[in-house]
Amino acid sequence: MTHSISNLNSKELLKIKGIQLFSSLVETLKKLNITCAAFNEQGDNFFLKLNENQINEIFITIQQIINNIELSIEKEKKEKDPLNINQLWTFLVSNKLKYPINLFDHITEGDILEVYDTQNKQIFRSYEFFKHCTYSLDELFSIPWNELYYRDPKYITEYMRLLSILMENKSKDVLVVKTVPPHWVSQIHSNRKISHFLQTKIICLLYDANEDVFGYIHTQKILEQP
């Protein structure tokens, strides 16, 4: 028996929308020659274990990523700038964010670029991240970050110390990270226990139009991988 959309409950509607959005992101990433699975091999829908507000936040983030990649591809065609950098620039401009004038002097193609809000929620990932990620998109967006990846706690502590200093001083400079050495980061939640040896490169704060701290940029470079 088939059911009309009007007869579906809110959870069923969220599932339909989620499957559509995750699948759309898969297709968008294919344009960058990146292959990702929407869901894991078991067909789990981890996003449905979250509350409705959390699910809708994920949907908004995914749509923003899709739009960002599409705009970045167009900009690359017109201006021939590296796609990874275009993607970050497009995100910053679209959200009217202010950043250090020399930020892009510290970024090279191949860097993994991430943006977090003031609650340490990741709201932007450059396409370079997806190139090295073997989690399904559902896992990536639905499972807490500390349940996905493991790194030595002492490096996390030092990183957070540096970030706290930037926040306290309302810094508008790029901090080149020198006190966190290259280290291994390992997947936790996947059957494939893949690890990457990487270098944390820079941290800098982002500000909104009212000069309030919006969040921060974190970049890293993979030095060794399976």
Image (cartoon, grey):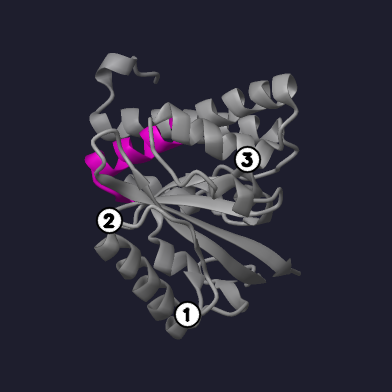
Task: Report crowding for label 1: few under 14, some 14 to 19, many 20 or more residues within 10 A (C-alpha).
Answer: some
Residue in the image at 71% along x and 30% along y: 31
Give the residues drawn in magenta, as a range.
49-64
Q: Nearer the viewer, mark 3 or mark 2?
A: 3
Whether 121 is drawn above or below 165: the answer is: above
Q: Which residue is mark 2?
A: 119
- Asked if residue 123 is among those painted magenta in the image, a careful observer would answer no
Q: Spatial distance from mark 2 to mark 1, Cα to Cα?
A: 19 Å
Mark 1 and mark 3 lie on one chain; the one further toward the N terminus is 3
The amino acid on which the numbered mark 2 sits, given as a three-letter code, is: Gln
Residue in the image at 42% along x and 68% along y: 147
Mark 3 and mark 2 lie on one chain; the one further toward the N terminus is 3
Mark on residue 85? 3
Residue 164 at x, y = what percent? 31, 68
Whether 191 is drawn above or below 119: the answer is: below
Mark 2 and mark 1 lie on one chain; the one further toward the N terminus is 2
Q: Which residue is mark 1?
A: 155
Whether 37 is drawn above or below 199: the answer is: above
Quadrant into which the C terminus falls? bottom right
The amino acid on which the numbered mark 1 sits, given as a three-letter code, is: Tyr
Q: Secondary structure at mark 3?
A: helix
